[in-house]
Image (cartoon, rainbow, N blue to C red):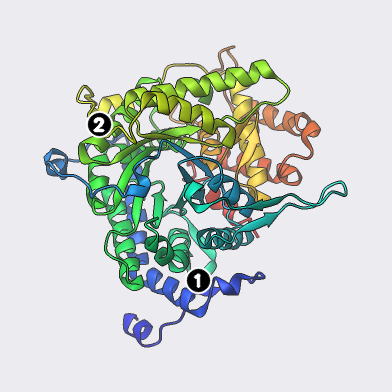
Amino acid sequence: MSAVLQAQPQPAHVLQRLPGQDALLTPEARAFLADLHRRHEGERQARLGARRARQQAFDAGALPDFRRDTAAIRAAAWRVAPVPAALADRRVEITGPVDPKMVINALNSGASCYMADFEDSTSPTWENLVAGQQALREAVAGTLQFTAPAADGAPGKQYALGPEAERAVLIVRPRGWHLDEKHVEVDGERMSASLFDLGLFAFHNARALAARDRGPYFYLPKLQSMEEAALWDAVMADIEARLGLPRGQMKATVLIETLPAAFEMDEILHALKDRVVGLNCGRWDYIFSYIKTLRRHRDRVLPERGQVTMVQPFLRAYSELLIQTCHRRGAHAMGGMAAQIPISGDAAANEAALARVRADKLREVTAGHDGTWVAHPALIPLAREVFDAGMPGPNQLHVARDDVHVEAADLLRPSLGTITRAGFEGNVEVCVRYLAAWLDGNGCVPIHHLMEDAATAEIARAQLWQWLHYADAGGEPLHLDDGTPVDFALLERAFIGLPSRLNDRLRMPGASRVNEAIGLLDRLTHADTLADFLTLPAYERLD
């Protein structure tokens, strides 16, 4: 078969047509993508198979641990390649989707970096993906403009990029290894969403960014092992060779947002050591992964999301181990997301929310993090103020954190807490509202003054499943703090009341798909096995 492919290579086949996409998906670009697929899809499938086998072991009672076969990597003295000048100071990074207005506002926001997100904050409709790639291509070229729709007879507001020297540094996050791109096929197979997102962006922009010493730079999501990191390294080396770039030109920051990856931070850095510049505490996905990985362990059930904060011992251990590991190897240790958004019309509530953000950023800079994330531009001045005061230099690579001693048990110790009725119903509401918006094409949704994305919806969905299936192996169900059993009758009551509770929010994103979202969540929570990702079955409903 390989001989046939080499003799008669066909470009990637695009199954849907949108105006303007031919300028992106040229024959040359489609041939480039097809070659990436043929070279790396086999290894991607092998890595996904290893994930499934690992999870089966955890479901059977095993616990994550540091690998014996890589002990020499953890013990040896080595460092990653030097961090490029454009990424030396990353004290405040803003994240968000890739629509043109967001791209302009984020690059103009005053943040150090902007993570343009094709993953958790973008609903991967074909229209969103094409528009996002077009917007980033124009942003790199410096030509991106956007005009908002006219309203109430007034002309739409104009948006344009500021001077290049004042823009945030662009970092792109492709989708994770587990996701396919159903609109693009190679040899009759769906293409990897990861390879599509990163490959298409690199094809059009890598040379231009390299010429300006601006990358290209990437955030790599949801890795679980050093082998998955090595696959990314091979992909980037392949792209560099194809585009005539020096090896190591493409740089990566890895999100440590799965529980298995927390046990392989040294190994992940080592697998990418010629191009990695840091690790990031992807806290929301990490909490979701903790729940998913330990879903069958009755002694490790977490309380409701609001009680699972970064001061909990297992999350503090994860954060401090990441700082120690990164600084030992010469890499940045990035902090986590502040998801709060301004609360208009309630000064007291807004001040309380800002106080929580300030305390969280103070914890991060004091612990030794080299930067942090915010979801809203209004939080940039606050986060910068805290990091300016606590980090006068460009980073804190000199903070070794030799005082940190983390064992496997520290990373696995669950939080103590409760499940309240408000917490249970809040999980249902967040998951339904987010999923309805996602199905409607919106992947970044303000709910109760928090900017929710797929990661936070996954926490809600995974907690509901674990709580409701707690008694599967026999024994008593969990109970709310008021004594009510956590069972499917409780879930049904939450579903019944939800549409009426949302009646006053009929203009919310995805309002027309609330019933569809309820039906999907109902099926997922009743399933005997927790689905790996909410977005996998939901993706089949897009477009």
Secondary element type, mark 1: strand
Q: Is the Cβ of the residue at disc 1 closer than 8 Å to that at disc 2? A: no
Residue wearing tag 2: 324
Where in the figure is residue 269, as x and y percent of width and height?
A: 26, 46
Where in the figure is residue 119, as x and y percent of width and height?
A: 51, 50
Dot 2 alpha-carbon crowd within 10 angstroms: few under 14, some 14 to 19, many 20 or more:
many
The amino acid type, in three-letter code, at marker 1 is: Glu
The amino acid type, in three-letter code, at marker 2 is: Gln
Residue wearing tag 1: 185
Residue 348 - label: none
Secondary element type, mark 2: helix
CA–CA distance between discs 1 and 2? Answer: 42 Å
Closest to the observer: 195 or 427? 195
Q: Which of marks 1 and 2 is in front?
A: 2
In this view, the residue farthest toward the top is: 482
Q: In this image, 183 relative to 76: left or right?
A: right
Q: In this image, 186 relative to 440: left or right?
A: left
Q: Give the residue displayed 33% in from the left and 41% down from the top.
A: 279
In this view, the residue farthest toward the right is: 153
Q: Give the residue displayed 35% in from the left and 43% down from the top.
A: 55
Q: How many labels, in total?
A: 2
Sequence order check: which comes first, mark 1 or mark 2? 1
Which quadrant would residue 126 be assigned to in this image?
bottom right
Closest to the observer: 260 or 488? 260
Image quarter in which the N terminus is found:
bottom left
Q: Give the residue displayed 63% in from the left and 21% down from the top.
A: 350
